[in-house]
Image: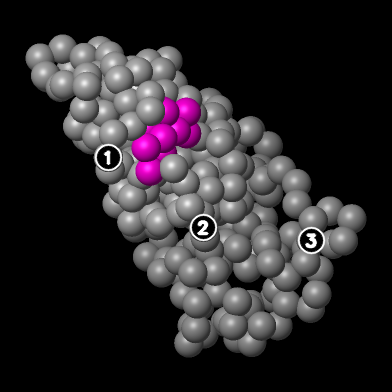
Amino acid sequence: MPSFAVTIPAGALRRSWLTGPAAGAVRTGAQFARLVRELSPRRRVDPSNPIECYAALMDECSQRFPVYESEFESWDVDEDPTDFAYMFDHGIPIAPVGCEPTVEDSVVYAFVGAELDMYNMGRPASVERVQETYSALHGVDLAWWAGPVRVVNENNLWGPAYRLPLPKGRAWSGAWRALPDLLEYVTGSTGNGFLDWTQSQIDDGGDMPPWNMDEIRACTRAWKEAQATLERIELLKFTLADDLQLLDRVMRGDARTLRAVTRPKHGKTLVDILR
């Protein structure tokens, strides 16, 4: 499970709220100012100006992890425009980068979604239906494809990430060490909130991490871990070069292919020795 809540309502903080004198403005400004000083001791902000303090805090946070700044600029709701306290109570508007395989440009993400039958729910997964579901697979030659590796039925709509058929006594080699990361990223099961939630999901409602230094530090750590995971995945995607047939053989447990992308769990491969 993600280490922190990441969903937010359809919009976060709206600029229409930030006008006129505010009930609780002094308290809110002081709370934001304190966090700014903890993050950047040399940065000066006016605690009596919650707008300035909030903007400074968002700037500091954005240097540490993604935040949903566009929501702050554009929302328009029937809330009290003087309720600055809501700015603080709402929490940190983080911006997750989870995978949405149906709309991603990456054919690898889309194909993994199709292989794991993420959206077909057990119905016959014809090539035509898959290409209609996953935009990145439009026009891709899938005549060779045998269908999903793991079929989801009505009694198992979703569960843990797909477990790869790793041969006994062997481990993933080189860039292929990121294959479990790739499958967990596509299925939203990495355990990292930035990777497991998508931008569309945060519009469905929920709570943000509260504004305090512990949560800011936790978000910072989580984002660093997320970046490392994404870098490993990108290296694997580069290595694959969109070779979906190779990926398919690996996920189906083809013995010869698995020997090529794994190494003995103990000791070095011939490639390692010859380096």
In percent of width and height, residue 51 lies at 24, 34
Q: Which residue is mark 1?
A: 20
The mark nearer the N terminus, 2 or 3, is 3
Q: Residue at x 58, y 81 (%)?
A: 131
In the displayed structure image, the side of residue 246 where residue 163 appears, left or right: right
The amino acid type, in three-letter code, at marker 1 is Gly
Which portion, as a residue range, is magenta? 81-93
Q: Is residue 262 visible?
A: no
Return the residue found at the far right.
155
Q: Earlier in the sequence, mark 3 or mark 1?
A: 1
Q: Residue 165: x, y in percent?
A: 68, 47
In the rendered structure, are the residues bearing label 2 and label 3 in contact, judged by CB atoms less than 8 Å apart? no
Spatial CA span between label 2 and label 1: 32 Å
Residue 244 in magenta stretch: no
- Judge depth for marks 2 and 3 and give the one in front: 2
Mark 1: few, some, or many residues within 10 Å (few <14, many ≥20)? few
Q: Is residue 82 visible?
A: yes
Residue 253 x/y as whole percent: 67, 55
* Residue kind at label 3, given as amino acid type: Val
Q: Is residue 244 above or below residue 203?
A: below
Type of amino acid under label 2: Ser
For numbered disc 3, what is the local secondary structure?
Answer: loop
SS for callout 2: loop
Residue assigned mark 2: 200
Q: Is 148 left, or right, of 189 in this rendering?
A: right
Q: Which residue is identified by label 3?
A: 152
Q: Residue 57's image quarter?
A: top left
Label 3 vs label 1, nearer the camera = 1
Q: Nearer the viewer, residue 36 or 96?
A: 36
84 is within the stretch colored magenta: yes
